[in-house]
Image: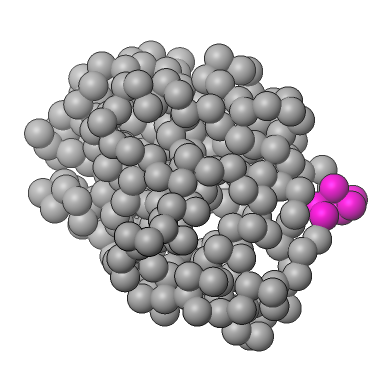
């Protein structure tokens, strides 16, 4: 199967390429097989026509900054249109913050998006664009990604704070379902070979606050978790999604890949150095 991965220099994209070394990866910045700005529809079409992929995994995105909306929305639309024109299977990566975080329960796939942040609005719009352009695409909503051969941005912030390099507090009232990058990559690659269409929630088995997540990461790396300060994001002037737990029951039924909880990965007795942030710094 010929596989094209956008955002190949990113955290998840890099793991996908490590697991599928024959795949072609694109990158806007950093290393990658092919340079690509997904905002350029003609360039996207040329890449897809050149690679002739059987499947496309779209991981490229921009968290913030100039051009973020165009990257997330127009970029997703461009990739979906090109994949559909080529008859390629598409798996699109999205996020739990397409939800407002005020349901008081885990979100299921049929819950309508209701974002409250700019990034969430862009990713919700991207989901709609993808489903309109490529109705057979799978849309994977996931959560905080961590682990792998190098620390994720979330882990780097935690380790810097735990080491006294960064003065930062971690929210006690924002609940997420962190997922190990290896589990997520394996699940996405498995999904490529399935005919599933529409949203699918693929996240870790534990719901934890950002503060608890930070304490777990710090402790696994040999730092004192008590050095990490907590704070309440609900006290900030701008609204943030608080409880973005994802119900992953559908994914557990559909996929063979086991989506481990962060406590198992970072506290479990069988935790190996490959999964330990202490081996990543």
Q: Residue 276 versus residue 97: which sits nearer the camera?
A: 276
Q: Quadrant of residue 177?
A: top right
Q: Say above or below: 86 vs 232.
A: above
Residue 42 in view, yes or no: no
Q: Position of residue 174 (x, y in %)?
A: 71, 47
Q: Position of residue 266 (x, y in %)?
A: 45, 61
Name the residue: 21% across, 56% down: 18
Q: Which quadrant: the C terminus?
A: bottom left
Q: Say above or below: 86 vs 237.
A: above
Q: Is residue 97 magenta?
A: no
Name the residue: 57% across, 51% down: 63
Q: Position of residue 183 (x, y in %)?
A: 33, 46
Q: Position of residue 94 (x, y in %)?
A: 49, 36
Q: How is the image coloured?
A: one colour
Q: Residue 202 versus residue 76: which sits nearer the camera?
A: 202
Tally of numbered discs: 0
Residue 261 in view, yes or no: yes
Q: Quadrant of residue 87?
A: top left
Q: Is residue 234 magenta?
A: yes
Q: Which residues are magenta?
A: 232-237
Name the residue: 66% across, 30% down: 99
Name the residue: 59% across, 70% down: 158
Q: Which quadrant: the N terminus?
A: top left
Which residue in the rendered view is the most extreme toward the bottom? 164
Q: Quadrant of residue 57?
A: top left
């Amino acid at each position: 199967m010929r596989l094209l991965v956008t955002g190949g220099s990113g955290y998840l994209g890099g793991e996908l390429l490590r697991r599928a070394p024959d795949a072609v990866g694109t990158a806007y910045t950093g290393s990658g097989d092919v340079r690509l700005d997904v905002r350029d529809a003609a360039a996207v079409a040329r890449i897809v026509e050149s690679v002739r992929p059987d499947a496309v995994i779209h991981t490229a995105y921009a968290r913030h900054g100039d051009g973020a909306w165009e990257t997330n929305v127009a970029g997703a639309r461009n990739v979906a249109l090109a994949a559909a024109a080529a008859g390629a299977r598409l798996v699109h990566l999205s996020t739990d913050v397409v939800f407002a975080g005020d349901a008081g329960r885990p979100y299921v796939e049929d819950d309508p998006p209701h974002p409250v942040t700019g990034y969430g609005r862009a990713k919700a719009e991207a989901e709609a664009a993808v489903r309109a352009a490529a109705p057979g695409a799978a849309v994977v909503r996931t959560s905080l990604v961590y682990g792998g051969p190098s620390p994720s941005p979330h882990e780097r912030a935690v380790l810097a704070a735990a080491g006294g390099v960064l003065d930062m507090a971690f929210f006690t009232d924002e609940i997420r379902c962190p997922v190990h990058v290896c589990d997520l990559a394996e699940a996405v690659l498995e999904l490529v070979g399935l005919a599933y269409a529409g949203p699918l929630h693929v996240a870790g088995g534990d719901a934890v606050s950002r503060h608890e997540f930070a304490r777990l990461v710090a402790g696994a790396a040999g730092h004192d978790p008590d050095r990490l300060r907590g704070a309440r994001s609900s006290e900030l002037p701008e609204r943030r999604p608080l409880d973005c737990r994802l119900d992953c029951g559908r994914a557990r039924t559909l996929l063979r890949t086991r989506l481990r909880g962060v406590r198992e990965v970072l506290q479990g007795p069988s935790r190996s150095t490959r999964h330990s942030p202490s081996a990543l710094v």
